[in-house]
């Protein structure tokens, strides 16, 4: 996925033009990779903490422990990181992660946070309610509210969460 984004980003206008910001594509890619690491890879590992090929039912005890740590420490860590990015000079105003414009990093962050919100709805709602991550959740709502994203979400092309990366197991969410 990251190489596909790196290829398509400039062609779709989802990174700053290289003539204006020669390193922008790499900064955007780093942000996308960080979102994929924290909100996709680590989220998936909560229900496969021991072996990726073993069934969830075979590792429930370990999954509970992993998920507890993930929602208590890792999700806030990544939310905080992206909150700081939005406040940084590189974000140019805090509406988007980089360069003051929508990039594929914003889209990746939205998708991965949406998946984590499906897998851990109580935990994400609790973190959102703290008010510590207003910029992040503002970005989430801005991306979700974009015309193209709304059309996609309402279309049949949108696959439901379930057996993929983001699975909802009530026993792994906040108690």
Image (cartoon, grey):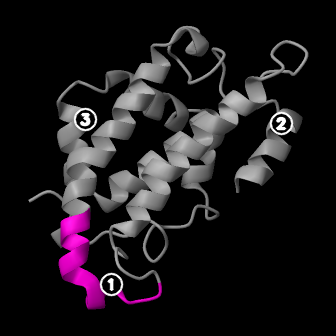
Note whether 125 is above or below 79 in the view shown.
below
Label 3 crowd bin: few (<14), some (14–19), many (20+), radius 10 Å: some
Task: Please tell me whether mark 1 sits on a helix, a strand or a loop.
Answer: helix
> Magenta region: which residues?
53-66
User: What predominant SS class does the magenta segment belong to?
Assistant: helix
Note whether 59 is above or below 135 in the view shown.
below
Task: Please tell me whether mark 3 sits on a helix, a strand or a loop.
Answer: helix
Q: Is residue 65 magenta?
A: yes
Label 1 crowd bin: few (<14), some (14–19), many (20+), radius 10 Å: some
Q: Whole-percent x and y of residue 108?
A: 58, 44
Snapshot quadrant of residue 76: top left
Task: Please tell me whether mark 2 sits on a helix, a strand or a loop.
Answer: loop
Q: Whole-percent x and y of residue 145?
A: 52, 33
Q: Is residue 92 magenta?
A: no
**Residue plotted at (33% across, 67% down):** 46
**Closer to the camera in the image, 140 or 97:** 97
Q: CA distance from mark 1 to mark 2?
A: 38 Å
Q: Are marks 3 and 2 in contact (CB under 8 Å)?
A: no
Note whether 62 is above or below 138 in the view shown.
below
Note whether 104 is above or below 139 in the view shown.
below
Mark toward the viewer: 1 or 3: 1
Determine which residue is flagged by label 3.
128
Please identify the quadrant where the N terminus is shown: bottom right
Q: CA distance from mark 1 to mark 3?
A: 28 Å
Determine which residue is flagged by label 1.
56
Task: Specify whether 104 is left or right of 126.
Answer: right
**Closer to the camera in the image, 124 or 72:** 72
**Closer to the camera in the image, 109 or 46:** 46
Determine which residue is flagged by label 2.
12
């Amino acid at each position: 996925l990251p190489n596909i984004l790196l290829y398509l980003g400039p062609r779709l206008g989802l990174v700053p033009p290289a003539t204006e910001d020669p390193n922008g594509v790499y900064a955007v890619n780093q942000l996308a990779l960080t979102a994929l690491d924290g909100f996709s890879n680590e989220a998936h590992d909560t229900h496969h903490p021991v072996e990726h090929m073993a069934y969830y039912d075979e590792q429930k005890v370990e999954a509970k422990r992993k998920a507890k740590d993930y929602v208590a420490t890792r999700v806030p860590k990544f939310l905080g990181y992206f909150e700081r990015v939005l406040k940084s000079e590189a974000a140019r105003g805090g509406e988007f992660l980089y360069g003051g414009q929508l990039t594929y990093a914003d889209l990746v962050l939205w998708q991965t946070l949406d998946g984590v919100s499906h897998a851990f709805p109580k935990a994400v709602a609790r973190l959102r309610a703290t008010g510590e991550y207003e910029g992040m959740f503002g970005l989430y709502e801005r991306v979700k509210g974009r015309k193209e994203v709304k059309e996609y979400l309402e279309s049949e092309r949108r696959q439901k969460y379930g057996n993929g990366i983001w699975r909802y197991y009530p026993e792994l969410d906040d108690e």
